[in-house]
Image (cartoon, coloured by chain):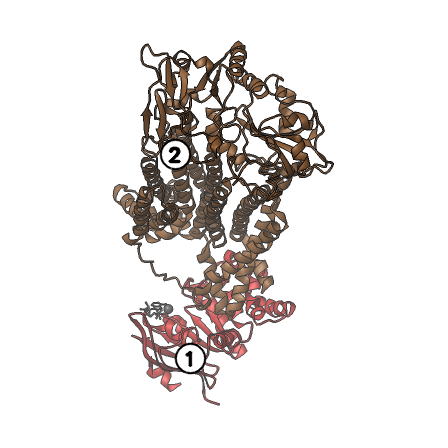
Chain colours: A brown, B red
Amino acid sequence: MIRMGMRLTLRGGREAVIRLIVTTLAVAVGVTVMLGVFSLFNAYQNTTARQCWECSPTTIRSASAPASASAGGTASPQGPGRPVGVNPDGTVDLAAAQQAGAKELWNFSQDFFQGTELRRLDLAALTADAPTLPGMSTVPAPGQYYVSPALSHLLATVPGDELGDRFPGHRVGLIPRTALYSPDELAIVIGHAPQELASRQATKPITAMSTAKEVKGTTTIYRFAFAFGTVALLLPIIIMVGTATRLSAARREERYAAMRLVGATPRQVATVASVESFVGAACGAVLGTLAYLALSSQVTKVNVTGTRFFPSEVSPGLLGYLGVLILVPAVSAFAAVRSLRRVQYDPLAVTRRATPKPPTVKRLIPLLLGVALFVVAVNLPATSNAGGVTYPSLILTMWGVVLAGPWVTMWSSRLLARIGGGAATMLAARRLADDPRATFRTVAGVTVAVFVGTAVAGVLPTAVAAETSGQRAPLTDVLRLRYDLGGQGEKVGLSPDQAAATLHDLRAMPGVSAIPIYLGAAAPGWTPASGTPPPPGWQPPPDYVSCAEAAALPALGSCAPGQTVSVIAADELFIDNPLMLHLPVLGYSDVDPTNGHSTAATVPPAIDLGKLQVTTLMVAASSPAALERARTYLDIHAPVLIGMASPDEWSTNAAGPMTFGEVASVRGAQYRAAQQMIMFVVGLTMFVAGCGIAVATAGSLVERKRPFTLLRLSGTPLRTLRRVVFLESALPLFAVSVLSGLSAYAMALIAVRSLAKGVSMSFPLGTYSVAVSVVVVAALGVILGSMTLLSRMTRSEYARFE
Amino acid sequence: MSEFILEARDVHRAFGQTQALRGASIAVRRGEILSIMGPSGSGKSTLLHCLAGIYTPNQGEVWFDGARVDKLGETKRTELRRDAFGFVFQFGQLVPELTALDNVALPLLLAKQPRRQAYAQAAPWLERLGLEEHGDHRSGELSGGQAQRVALARALVHKPRVLFADEPTGALDTLTGEAVMDLLVTAAREEGTTVVLVTHDARVAAYADREVIVRDGRAITTPSSAVA
Ligand SMILES: Nc1ncnc2c1ncn2[C@@H]1O[C@H](COP(=O)(O)OP(=O)(O)O)[C@@H](O)[C@H]1O
Ligand SMILES: [Mg+2]
């Protein structure tokens, strides 16, 4: 029987060959896409499993609890006292540290170059066994540094005063891959003499580097997105492969019935059927694997999470290959057998097929429920666990769209029948109304992709845009440095002398302007040094700015006429919460995030700014190069030094020499990574769904070769037949895409309206329309392409009725 | 051994609301050619399918060679069809992707005969029915008369005890139909095969030894045949 199945598959004539080719191609496309996704997922897994050497190292705690590890970023700088060997001003007492057993001095900071984050680790070995980065054998010697390949490239191409001068010493090698997340990552490890590094604030004596895995908060987002993406992608793949393996099922059923009639047992028929499916699926799996191997160098360039992966890690792995090569053919053989159940028990090919019941309005219920639930979810107070309602409502809505599809297809076909005259419209409408489920199935993948794409296009760009646009937009490229987080929590800043020198140098640079913010006198009654919480009603010291200087950045607001000094809510300059960006800062001492109000404050008379410490610097530059020159100068002469325990604290406190745009981009990186990933999935889904449509259209043609040939013989012009086929695919595609696009847009609108008050939805209409047009044109092209089959198939010399 | 090889006793069969057979009784003698006649829709095909064990009756009994057919399970009935029965229908019973020779060899292959032997046994049948030049043609490429001859060869290749023919000439012109009927009757007589021939065409029925008329789901044995 296996031989018989092979014979039917391979030597069964034109139709069998077409069927085999289409099945093979469809499975191959599915397999290629699946292998690509596996590879990226593997690479992602490897990346998240990487040792986070920049995370909190093991410091030495007080004598009562020696060498306790400060776990993954939870220890605050104000935590349970300073580690042993750290002076109150944030520098290191080298002798004390060595005596306590420190092996190394450690100072991690975050820098930026033209918007890209740069991880910088300054080290000084104290002992021969000082800890170093994974994959590196030694700590860099004083005056030497190791850089990531991407930074090495930058150092070679960018003028020193924009980047290279920030790093003392010279390059001796590259940071090994095992210590990096991405080939595009900017990182540097600099070696120092112990004495030198000890004198820098925020340095820590440590005994070991962190062996924790990456602690970035994005991991759950990625997990969710990957899971979501896999489902969103698998669905159209399954639909496509299913359509392909069931091609011209009716014709095959007749044939199997004929075999049953002459005494083939159900098992024998099942064997033949599964051999046929198996051959197609196995060819497809092999072809798909070969295609993946040919494309794999391109796959490594795919930027899923915002940064590229190392090419050598982008691989489906042995398990991935084996799974695809074994499971895909096995599953399709099994599916073929299952779909045969009806025929197995009836040796007379049943031609009188019962017309399936038309879909009812009930199919709209889950969709409506999902939208209703979503409205509830976004209106829940932010503090409650809204995710528990939001995700189910999203899934319910998506499922609802797919479920409502056949109903919409049916109604749009009825509408079509009413509007259009003509034989083509009648024929297409009749078939659509006859089995709307089957017709919808072919376009379901596109529907899901349109839904996800529209929702993402509605929500994520709005979230990202809200952080860099609006009133603060002019500040996007302004560097701001925060000096008041130094030491162990005391509000300190640059001394008046330091500030004056820094401002002088900065203002001497062409195209650079700087605005200092000054620290007022603290209210009496409490100092941070007391170690107790502040008494109720105690006000932190106010921040001041010169009205003349502030005028350089109108986005900050404006002073009253005649005013020379104003209070400024300096802390709020570091807020990137889109809900508060519209609140004024100049003339206010505080912004209350809970009620969205600013607290007005007045300036005490006769204040001399020149005698005050500078807590914050805002530096504007006329060009990216000037900006990097200013940043390089500040890195060397007035670095922001705070005792952050982990990179997470760096980004959440956003204290580094970053522009507002970079602050937003650190936050926005999560959104953008998710967006990128979802768009990636949507694109692939569209692609697979498009292939699915091609397969389904070709399949329906092969299936109806007989009636179409008859129609053509009886004088129906080919043009009419083309219109029939075209309408059959294009109508459900159009109707259901409109439905899913509209519901997704509505949900995005609801989300933006209720989650971010005062932020208007920034829907990328241009990009979206282009993307949608491309998809529609591609889908229509695919449908038209499969129609070339039509004229050849229905030529009268093939008008045989076996 | 009974005189009758095949018997239907008071067979009822319904399809949903349609009562196709309402108590049809018929008995087929060993080696005879029996024609079942009647207007279209009267239940002829349904009766044939019940006799051949394709359908099971809702009520009544079907006997083959002294054993109840309607009580057999699906697998046993399949084996019975494979080993003891042959079929020629109006059209559509060939597997279009297979060649004429493949189609003829199919019942033997299904019965797990070795390939070589199956084809060796099938080839002479093509010759016998004047199809030796068409053995390599896909059955989808044959003319109607050729296809019916292939179907006949396939129905007889495994030496069945009974040949069921349902409108075997229904899709053919008169001349071709007569040629096919000649071949069918000659071959059946040579092989000693019992034939149950369903037709609404009196000229086709004339090839039979005896005829039964089916009307409204009941079989009526005609006076002329009662004599035989
Ligand atoms: N598979 C079936 N499903 C439903 N009705 C059937 C089926 N087969 C036969 N019938 C009905 O049973 C009646 C007898 O049909 P049939 O035996 O094919 O008649 P004949 O062969 O004499 O033309 C007809 O009314 C027909 O519509
Ligand atoms: Mg009939």
- Neighbour class for label 1 at 10 Å: few (<14), some, many (≥20)? many
Residue shown at the point (33%, 42%) measured from the top left: A381
Residue A633 appears at what percent x and percent y?
Answer: 57, 17
Residue furthest out toward the bottom: B1
Query: Quadrant for ligand 2?
Result: bottom left
Subunit that carries the residue with mark 1: B
Q: Amino acid at mark 1?
A: Asp
Residue shown at the point (54%, 60%) measured from the top left: A274
Looking at this view, is A753 or B101 the one in front?
A: A753
Q: Residue B70 bears which disc, if any?
A: 1
Q: Residue A535 bears which disc, if any?
A: 2
Report helix, strand or loop for mark 1: loop
Looking at this view, is B80 or A326 the one in front?
A: A326
Residue furthest out toward the left: A418
Residue A593 appears at what percent x and percent y?
Answer: 36, 32
Please, is residue B136 above or below residue A671 in the view? below
Residue A394 appears at what percent x and percent y?
Answer: 37, 46
Image quarter of the C terminus of chain B? bottom left
